[in-house]
Amino acid sequence: MKPQFLIAAASSGSGKTTLTTGLLGALRSRGLKVQPFKCGPDYIDTRFHEAATGRPSVNLDTWLSSEAHVQELYARYGADADVCVTEGVMGFYDGYDRASGSSAQIAFLTGAPVVLVAGARSASYTLAAQLYGLQHFRPGLRFAGVVFNSVGSPRHERLLRQAAEDAGIPCLGAIPRLEELEIPSRHLGLQLSDPKEMEQRAARMAALTERYVNVQELLDRTASDFPVPGVAPAPMRCGKPLRIAVARDAAFNFIYSENLARLKQSGEVTFFSPLAGDGLPEADLVYFPGGYPELHVRELSVLEPLKKQVRDYAEAGGRILAECGGMIWLCRSLEGVEGGPFPFCGVLPFSATMEGARLHMGYRRIVDASGREWRGHEFHYSSLTGPDALPSVAQQFDATGEKVPTPLYRYRNVIAGYTHFYWGESNILYLWA
């Protein structure tokens, strides 16, 4: 038995990340070991989770992996924790195909009780009908309570508590409209540019959550049997143990926790920071994950020794995996940024641009010429100039099976594209097989 719960809402923008981050920090401040999880492919909310708990947050996603893998991850990462907290995605029943891939599916697979967060900025008693519907739409789920967010006044709170009572769900708290709880816009990841500021914000959110949420009642109502870990995927091997270099700093930081764990099974992982002036480590494989190179374009553009090391490594046949922001770093330059264009590594024969920036987002199934498949997620605002300078080596499909034009490039042993791969139960090393 241990407290475990999934935080869900009727829609995005209700306050899931705010409540999750606040609760994670509040529980940690009580001396509890808290394991955070995130429904879906998000690699931004997980950064808030880590800032609040000091532990990596683990993605649970039934598009990126099998249901059995989700259950095994939850049991394995939560085994030594005192409390497990999962943040939902979008609306509770919103998935890539009806409820498939939704927060509701993850709650069902993990057995975690559900704590609803209801945005109350423009509603009061009508929320009773919404809360009732969320609880009774699908059988087999356990609802532990609701926390109201953006409460306008004591009278508003009384109406909301009446709504919860008539919907048959305990009210666990009512959080007022507070500027301190507002999370900055995700566009260009402005909230991730300063890790120390993230930790300070998480601490403020934890203190306010303790004030407005009955944390102890929440823990009491969510204590339940925790699953026993199942069989983990076989270790990722491809010949002898590898030396793996992973770029990790404010410019390169979109890394799935389980991806990193799988790389560590394959050899010795060394982290390096381009922004800190680190050189390229001796490696058999170099990983440049996604992130925000556009926010650090001036610092990155003047790293001449590192850029030359990356070019020389690529030309010598060194294996590189570069995803999204990592791919941009390998381009000739980044354009569409004030003061630009800014020269980058020049490994790939095209440039990236922020001009006309618009969001490209969605699940991706990647099929290469040999018929091998991988799963991933695309999320970016930039685009490429002259993208046909290299042919794509794979066809990508969205969650409905429709073809998408997103390319995957290969130059020598450099594999690069906008898609963020997930290899929690596959072997990414086979990309070079």
Image (cartoon, rainbow, N blue to C red):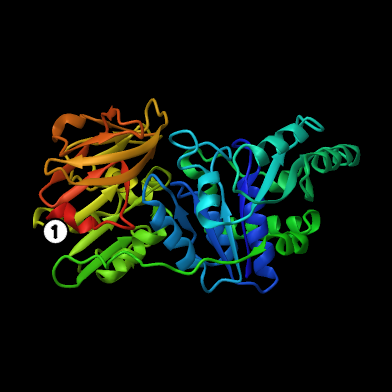
Furthest residue to the top?
356
* Drawn side of residue 82 relative to residue 348, left or right: right
Q: Is residue 288 visible?
A: yes
* Drawn side of residue 207 relative to residue 405, left or right: right
Amino acid carrying label 1: it is Gly
Binning the other alpha carbons within 10 Å of mark 1 as few (below 14), some (14 to 19) or many (20 upward) gives some
Count of numbered marks: 1
Q: Residue at x 54, y 50 (%)?
A: 108
Q: Position of residue 144 (x, y in %)?
A: 70, 53
Task: Kindly identify which residue carries mark 1.
Answer: 318
Furthest residue to the right?
155
Q: Residue at x 60, y 43 (%)?
A: 139
Q: Is residue 127 above or below residue 290?
A: above
Which quadrant holds the C terminus? bottom left
Q: Nearer the viewer, residue 216 or 130?
A: 130
Q: Residue at x 24, y 53 (%)?
A: 321
Which quadrant holds the N terminus? bottom right
Q: Position of residue 416 (x, y in %)?
A: 23, 45
Q: Nearer the viewer, residue 105 or 381?
A: 105
Q: Position of residue 256 (x, y in %)?
A: 39, 56
Q: Nearer the viewer, residue 27 or 278?
A: 27
Q: Nearer the viewer, residue 425 or 141?
A: 141
- Helix, strand or loop status at disc 1: loop
| Snapshot quadrant of residue 69 | bottom left
* Drawn side of residue 342 relative to residue 86, left or right: left
Q: Is residue 294 above or below residue 194?
A: above
| Snapshot quadrant of residue 411 | top left
Furthest residue to the front?
139
Q: Is residue 273 visible?
A: no
